[in-house]
Image (tube, rainbow, N blue to C red):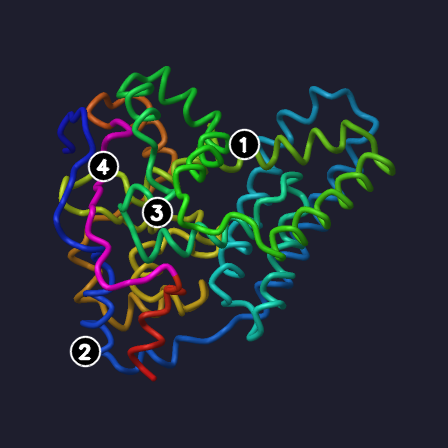
Amino acid sequence: MAQRISTFVEVDTTEPHRIRTRQIVKAHPEVKQLMTRNPTTFLIGVACVSAQVLLAYLLRNQAWYWTLPVAYLVGAFFSHTLFVVIHEAAHNLVFKKLWQNVAVGIIANFPSVVPTAISFKNFHIKHHVFQGVHELDADLPDWYEARLIRNYSLGKAIWLFFFPLFQVIRTVRCREVAAVDRYVVANFVAQVAFDVAIVYFFGWTAMLYLFLSFWFSVGLHPLGARWIQEHYLTLDPRQETYSYYGPLNGINLNVGFHNEHHDMPSIPWNNLPKLKAVAPEFYEPLLHHTSYTKLFFRFLFDQEISLFSRITRKARGRATLQDNSTPDLQLVK
């Protein structure tokens, strides 16, 4: 059980996953065979984009309030899967060339209304390299967030509801990370064109449905428990990364295999269960989650869990800002 804390848990060690990466590669050099790319991810993304556009079309002439249940019960799942597609593209795990993966991310971003795919890529890679380093890891809550929300149920519910907004605000503190580049501009231009087309051909109700689907998929929804699952100290005050082994991995493209992903970021989603099977001695001893819904309500109502339930560190190790988070691939070359 996590202890009630009023400050982040600071450690003097560097990001922990690269140590396990070296150990796994040494014990199981065959994991190199799992480091491939999966073009099928693009097809899944196109299917989800098409489904969301179809649902937006079907809702275009309905009363606006119908968008709420459809977005929460259906659209959020499509949007969350698309977020995982963006995540795979951010790690260049869909196609071989960088521009192709950028294109996948931009296309998968379309139903989310807000152009975030490429900005997410830029900040997410630094989360892998500098996990827990406050000025570089945008996955870590701001001090003001944690002090504002603390461990109150209502506050945590409000925080989850506005999670996309908090996530954007956090990036301001990561001043060493390039926030704008040509791909970010391309993402913005393409997204604006898509949004204008949706409003022009389908109307504002369709746009509202797409926006709500995105908002629910990363916020006050059982799917939002993913953000708690990954790095919050919910099961052990010393284990800072957790995997989720539950049924939603089926539609979330195994995004729950989070320890496996951090250890081997060059392995695509379809091979992460294989990594766990190849190296069980590294993963079976680790605590994990099996239910997003259970974790969702536990986070809300367990006052021993707060936004301070995270590990932080000052040590950056030997990594540089140019590190693209492929330690596993570098070790097997």
Marks 3/1: CA–CA distance: 26 Å
The segment highlighted magenta reads: 306-321
Q: Amino acid at mark 4?
A: Thr
Task: Answer with left or right where residue 13 lies relative to residue 30.
Answer: left
Mark 2 vs mark 3: in front: 3
Whole-angstrom CA distance, mark 4 to mark 3, is 23 Å
On whether residue 307 falls in the magenta region, the answer is: yes
Q: Could you tell me which secondary element the residue under label 3 belongs to?
A: loop
Reading the image, the residue beneath label 2 is 27
Circle 3: residue type: Leu
The residue depicted at 22 percent of the width and 46 percent of the height is 240
Residue on which disc 3 sits: 136
Give the mark nearer the N terminus: 2 vs 4.
2
Residue 279 location in percent, x, y? 23, 70
> Toward the viewer: 62 or 146?
146
Judged by depth in the image, the label closer to the viewer, 4 or 3, is 3
Circle on res. 216? 1
- As rendered, which of 74 and 309 lies closer to the eye? 309
